[in-house]
Amino acid sequence: MAYKTLVEGYVSIVKRVIRWEMTKLEFSDPFAGVRLFYPGTAAPPKPAQPLSAERISAIFREGVAGGMLDEAMLPLLGQLTGRRLGLLVHFTGNDLREKYPGVWVAQTEGIVLLDGVWTRVPYKTQASTTFFVLHEIGFVERRRLPVPAADRPA
């Protein structure tokens, strides 16, 4: 497990939960002055490398060749918004709304109804569930179009 995941993910969440309950129940902090040690085997952070313009173009061309708007546009939407494709593929028309006049945003509620069953949307961090401005590139219009029977999931 990565060092950053331990410190900023698991440990910080556990500390917040414990401190919240201590405050609520008016307990003194039993961890005051305690120092945490993390294993030397925790993986160091890996620097993120943005995709080159050539690679983005190649991905777009491959998507266009598939003949599906989603295949062409989804990788570009991921690049534009900084959201993971695994999250974007779960967006539905209900996740798009006009926040201000003429300003459309996308935001998942974190749960969707699929085939009559409420299912968690796979997101990595809580920040993934915050709204982002959906630049007008055709998605808002597409949201309003009925899905042809041939394109509906079986």
Image (cartoon, rainbow, N blue to C red):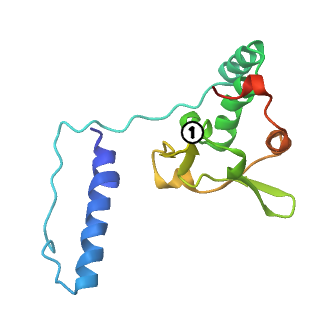
**Residue at x 61% of width, y 35% of height:** 89
Residue 102 image position (x, y, % from top left): 87, 58
- Against 149, residue 80 (above or below) is below
Q: Nearer the viewer, residue 76 or 44?
A: 76
Residue 126 image position (x, y, % from top left): 48, 55
In this rendering, position of residue 137 left or right of residue 112 = right
Residue underneath mark 1: 115
- Against 139, residue 73 (above or below) is above
Q: How many marks?
A: 1
| SS at circle 1 | loop
Quarter-wise, where is residue 97 in the image?
bottom right
In this rendering, position of residue 16 left or right of residue 100 = left
Q: Nearer the viewer, residue 69 or 59?
A: 69
Residue 42 image position (x, y, % from top left): 23, 39
Badge 1, how many Cα within 10 Å: few under 14, some, many 20+?
few
**Residue at x 16% of width, y 43% of height:** 39
In this rendering, position of residue 92 left or right of residue 143 = left
Residue 139 image position (x, y, % from top left): 79, 40
Quarter-wise, where is residue 78 in the image?
top right
**Residue at x 58% of width, y 31% of height:** 50
Which residue is outermost to the bottom? 26
Rendered-image quadrant of the N terminus: top left
Q: Nearer the viewer, residue 94 or 12?
A: 94
Rendered-image quadrant of the C terminus: top right
- Disc 1 marks a residue whose amino acid type is Asp
- Against 105, residue 62 (above or below) is above
- Against 146, residue 30 (above or below) is below
**Residue at x 70% of width, y 36% of height:** 77
